[in-house]
Image: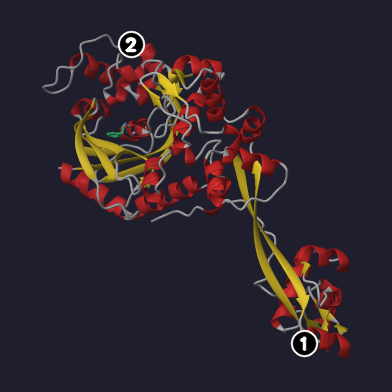
Amino acid sequence: MKLPAAQVAVLEAASANDAQPMDHLAETADLEPATVAGAAFALEEEGLVGVTERVETSATLTDEGRQYLENGLPETELFRVVREAGTETDLGSAIDAADLDGPQVDIALSNYARKGYGSVESGTITADPDADPDDDPERRVLAALADGESIADEAVLDRLGSRNLINRHEDTYREVWLTDDGITALMEGVETADTVGEVTPELLTTGEWRDVEFAEYNVEADAEQAHGGRIHVLRRTAERVKDVLVGMGFEEMDGPHVDADFWINDCLFMPQDHPARTHWGRFEMEQPTEIDDLPADLVERVRAAHRDGVDDGEGYHSPWDESFARKLALRGHTTSLSARYLSGLEVGELEPPQRFFSVEKVYRNDTLDATHLLEFFQIEGLVMAENLSVRDLMGTFTEFYEQFGITDLEFKPTYNPYTEPSFELFGEHPVTGEIVEIGNSGLFRPEMLEPLGVDCDVMAWGLALERLLMLTHGFEDIRDVHGTLVDLDFLRNAEVVY
Ligand SMILES: N[C@@H](Cc1ccccc1)C(=O)O
């Protein structure tokens, strides 16, 4: 019988009486583990060897687990203190005496009751005289694991895992042994076939490839996983959003991340004393501090709108300071781009109908939490046409979100200084069922449009890309999508949903 070299080596190294681990065979045969795996599976297919798979779970202590093993679990330490004091004592002094602080207090109390060490009621903690902290199953398992013993008690292992006191791993071991057919083949004699595993330039140029025998590939053989680079799912979703909007007839806007307050706020009829314009809401530039050029005639019309209003509007009558309008800051929304485009300064005077969008970063001085980041992607859009209504706005959103499988939009009237009417958009979170805000929209007010020289209707919106991703993927914490805590496996495997 003729077999490829690696298979011959594995066959000769395998034994009929002893199943041997693959890595052991790799050592004996002096081959790469992946080569041995490929050869063993090929031999298995020929019936010459058998391959068995064994999955072994093991567990290692986390830093916290190790610390508790040394110093005692918070709940057992609490129990010892209460026992020393008798059968009951004041909770506060027990916590002090057990030297518990911060999150350890909660950890101690919840496990104390769960394990039947005693109970806590109105500031008094009792200890069950029959409980024995030396016999604590979690403590015993931690100690056994630290000694390298293997543990069969799944319930305790699960509990320790959920307390983050151990990390659990799964390892797959494969063992190979000779079958009767394998023994017969070896006895009859096995020769190495001159098979070629790889096409080389020489084989091609000499034409030798025509005569050689190629080794078969086993595409099912186990191999080490290789991870290539990949575009972040958020970026890919942004690209998908752009495709959808282009498909709906929109053109992309482009503009500066750092911009003058004039474009970010003043053109939007945002009063200069609006809370979002203070340093709490914005990231101001230290260097440079001011924009060089602003169109003087537009500045004048914007000032007049703020001071005295337009049409029947009253304006704010409050002071309007051009030096504030010139201040540079990271944009808090991309509506600055809409203002720039509507002003006619970006791509010339716009004649209706027009549709524009951007999917770009915005920056806000918010407090980080499950639904807020300091920077996020905004899906900005505007439609400029005669006689637009709220129905056009709702219809556009319905059509847009349908492309991502979101069909249960809700609308709520809201207030923006630059739109009237204004609507917030909500969608249902697929996991929690909660109604999540996903965007803000409205029809731009005359106080914004007149100074910009626009005399038809403009409807516009800002939607959060990260929130869209929360709805399509079911994330509950936006920090699961980007930031330092994101799971690498998630990034490797996440797909855009639409
Ligand atoms: N600028 C608003 C979104 C918006 C844009 C255009 C019109 C209405 C609302 C925001 O950031 O929330």
The one of 20 and 280 positioned closer to us in this rendering = 20
The one of 460 and 211 positioned closer to us in this rendering = 211
**The C terminus lies in which quarter of the figure?**
bottom left
Q: Which of the labelled discs sits on residue 181, or is there none?
A: 1
Q: Which of the labelled discs sits on residue 119, or is there none?
A: none
How far across and how far down the image is residue 352, in percent? 24, 43
* 299 horizontally vs 64: left or right: left
Q: Residue at x 53, y 29 (%)?
A: 75
Q: Is residue 252 above or below residue 113?
A: below
Which residue in the rendered view is the most extreme toward the left?
Answer: 312
* 139 horizontally vs 355: left or right: right
The one of 402 and 434 positioned closer to us in this rendering = 434
Quarter of the rendering containing residue 181: bottom right
Q: Residue at x 37, y 41 (%)?
A: 467
Local packing at callout 1 (Cα closer than 10 Å; few below 14, some 14-19, many 20+) is few
Helix, strand or loop status at disc 2: loop
- Amino acid at dot 2: Asp
C-alpha gap between disc 1 and disc 2:
93 Å
Figure quarter occupied by ligand 1? top left
Residue that label 2 marks: 321
* 315 horizontally vs 137: left or right: left
Helix, strand or loop status at disc 1: helix
Q: Considering only order in the chain, which callout, 2 or 1, is on the residue closer to the N terminus?
A: 1
Q: Residue at x 43, y 22 (%)?
A: 125
**The N terminus lies in which quarter of the figure?**
bottom right
How far across and how far down the image is residue 469, in percent? 40, 46
